[in-house]
Amino acid sequence: MPVEFVAKPEDRFAFGLWTVGNRGRDPFGDAVRPKIETVDMIKGLADLGVWGISFHDDDLMTFGAPEAQRQAEVEAFKKALDETGLVCSMATTNLFHHPVFKDGAFTSNDPSVRRFAMQKVMRNIDLAAELGAPTYVFWGGREGVETAAAKDTRDALSRYAEALDFLAGYVLDKGYGMRFALEPKPNEPRGDIFLPTVGHALAFISTLEHADMVGVNPEVAHETMSGLSFYQAVAQAVWQDKLFHIDLNDQRIGRFDQDFRFGSEGIKDHFFLVRLLENSGYAGAKHFDAHAYRTEDVAGVWDFARGCIRNYLALAAKAREFDQDPRVAEAMAYSGVAELAEPTVGPYSSESAARLKAESFDVDVLATRGFGNEALDQLVIDHILGIA
């Protein structure tokens, strides 16, 4: 009998309204499945044991609609959360769909567009705080260029930082207790997007006035599009205590942003990612930012959501088995995994520098050491394949 992997609230799984709500549109074709109403999305996710749900302002409220309609949409959302027990795990702003943002939002060359973008964010931050969202994500999908002549990147980054500093000040002034998370992406929909990778975002954050309240929201697809290891990006974010949120999906290297079901492509990298999240003490949302294939009807949407959960839990189980295998412990000892956690020289002093300069090394002997990585990696594969 197949193993059942069922989500529990303590797993802290979350989905965005735009994920299960995706109707299968792409640049070459219109919607292929009917709209799922917001209340039905929430109820369907609750039935799967999901803990949280996130939203863009324009997912939840009709852009440009009368205030009475927008408030009614919010009230229906609140009522569904109360009835199901789901929490609002994160919120963000749509600064990419409307034509007004064609040249960017925070980095548009038009100051009025920049001010409108910041106003739009402030208004949705108010709602996010009212709903109890602990994290506010910023994805700069339109913050970029097709031609480098159109913007001085240095000025663009200054305006980006100005916006985030201002909005952080707003949150602090209001006492909302909310943190920001930047979501990098190398390209699409812009030819080149500012802050294209986790590394760029981490460096940028260090320049901000309120850097302590700004972290990253890495996404599997976005980092993989650039040909980089998502696991390595997340590991560095954890190391710098900047993993404030995470978007889980899947992606093939070198393709457009595919947003596949989590665990459907990069199994090995995901194994290490899940192991890291489970072992590092990360307590934030495990947010699935993906959508069902264009081939699917509404039933297929729920198959997709169920598959994301199942794949994560299955990989978590495999990671536990791996960590408990004495053969793995032996192989790691041979490879010297634990030795890397030991300081090399310790803090600098003139005495320690003198001792190091006086130390004698037989480099020919050191060069003969094998590290047994082939055997260790095969144990990884054996566990993933279930043949350990």
Image (cartoon, helix red, strand yellow):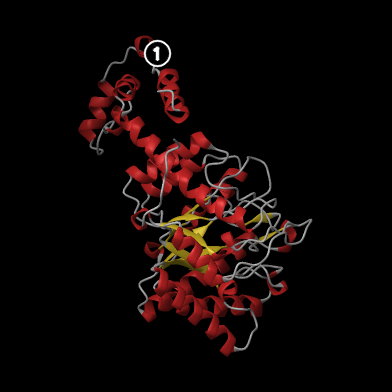
| Quadrant including the C terminus | top left
Kindly indicate the quadrant of the structure image that contains residue 297: bottom right
Q: Can residue 161 be seen in this view?
A: no
In the picture provided, is 8 more to the left or to the right than 270?
A: left
Q: Is residue 49 visible?
A: yes
Q: Say above or below: 40 vs 2.
A: below
Kindly indicate the quadrant of the structure image that contains residue 215: bottom left
Report the residue at 29% width, 29% height from top.
338
In the picture provided, is 93 more to the left or to the right than 357?
A: right
Report the residue at 62% width, 45% height from top.
225
Q: Say above or below: 86 vs 341.
A: below
Say how many tags the image has. Answer: 1
Report the residue at 55% width, 65% height from top.
17
| Quadrant including the N terminus | top left
The residue to which callout 1 is attached is 367
Q: Say above or below: 250 vs 356.
A: below
Name the one closer to the observer, 14 or 47: 47
Q: Which amino acid does label 1 sit on?
A: Ala
Residue furthest to the front in view is 1
Q: Position of residue 165 (x, y in %)?
A: 47, 71
Q: Position of residue 285 (x, y in %)?
A: 41, 57
Kindly indicate the quadrant of the structure image that contains residue 69: bottom right
Name the one closer to the observer, 173 or 9: 9
Q: Position of residue 151 (x, y in %)?
A: 69, 63
Q: Position of residue 206 (x, y in %)?
A: 43, 58
In the picture provided, is 129 more to the left or to the right than 116?
A: left
Residue furthest to the right in view is 28
Q: What element carries label 1?
A: helix
Disc 1 residue crowd, few under 14, some 14–19, many 20+, Cα 10 Å? few
